[in-house]
Each structure stands twice: as C-alpha cells, then as structure tokens.
Image (cartoon, grey):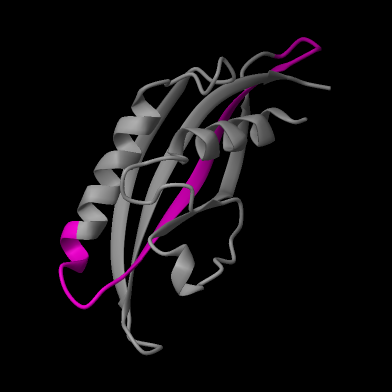
Amino acid sequence: MSTRTAIRDNVVSALTGLTTTGSNVFRSRVYPVAETKLPGLCVYTETDDAVYSTIPSPRTLDRLLTLKVEAYVKATADYDEALDAIEEEIRTALYADLTRGGNAQDTRVTGFVAQLSDEGDQPIAYGEVTVEVHYTQQEG
C-alpha cells in the first residue's frame, strides 16, 4: 500500500463515527446522493506535490498531500449551522493524530467552502474542507 493510500485511509477512519455524519464516510469523488446516506462525507485526493530535499541517491522527497473532505447535508433550514458543526467535528477528529498513524509529519485543515444545490426535491448543502498532510518519502 502506498503512503498516500495509508494516509487517506487513516483520514477516512478518523472521520468515521462523527456525531453528525456517523458511518456515512465514502472513499470517492462521486458521492452516492441517496437520502439515507445524508448527512455524509466524501474523502479523496486532490493533489500530491513533491520536492526533492536531498541530492545524493536515494533522494528524499518532501510531499504535500492535499485531500478534500466533502460534507453533504439535506434539510429545509439551518444549512450553515449543520455544515459548521460538521467542519468542527472534522477538525477535532483530524487534530487528534497529526501524524496520520505515523505516516506523516503534520496535518492541517487549511480551508472551507460552502455551497448550495437546489437540484432535487430538497436543496442539498455542500461543504468542502481542504486538508493538507506533509510527509516524506525515499525515492524508489
């Protein structure tokens, strides 16, 4: 298993069982929008950038993995409050282990964006949390 996969799996595990979203945590960019899955989270890799920090072989790479955690809620009111509560639960869960099970040097929640979709019988609010994880890796 790659370090990136191990980190992403660790994030999914850390977010499973939150008060608001429970076990509705998915490893996918495509969220199953079934009403029974809401509120829910979707976790996926956005980017994984690398910078070589040593010259002699085997070289060390400093990596910055950017994950997205999308939160979906469906209700008739209080969208902002629901998304704020979920974002706070996400931060608290991720900050409990900054090393992602020993696979990383640091974890940071660096952004949050909220949107509203009026498609369907009830609007769905969507929040996107940006998580940056710094880790190192040996070349090869």
Q: Nearer the viewer, residue 87 or 53?
A: 87
Corner quadrant of residue 39: bottom left
Q: Nearer the viewer, residue 62 or 105?
A: 105
Residue closest to the far right: 140
Corner quadrant of residue 103: top right
Q: Is residue 60 magenta?
A: yes
> Residue shown at 37%/41% (left/top)?
18
Residue closest to the far front: 36
Q: Nearer the viewer, residue 19 or 68?
A: 19
The correct choice, above or below, for 132 with respect to 138 in the image is: below
Residue 85: give x, y in percent of width and height: 22, 49
The mark tally for this picture is: 0
Residue 131: give x, y in percent of width and height: 42, 41
The correct choice, above or below, for 38 with respect to 16 in the image is: below
Residue 132: give x, y in percent of width and height: 45, 36
Residue closest to the far top: 56
The correct choice, above or below, for 42 with respect to 34 in the image is: above
Q: Is residue 9 left or right of residue 109?
A: right
| Quadrant of the snapshot with the C terminus | top right
| Quadrant of the snapshot with the N terminus | top right
Start-end of magenta stretch: 55-81
> Residue shown at 37%/50% (left/top)?
129
Corner quadrant of residue 120: bottom left
Q: Is residue 65 magenta?
A: yes
> Residue shown at 60%/40% (left/top)?
48
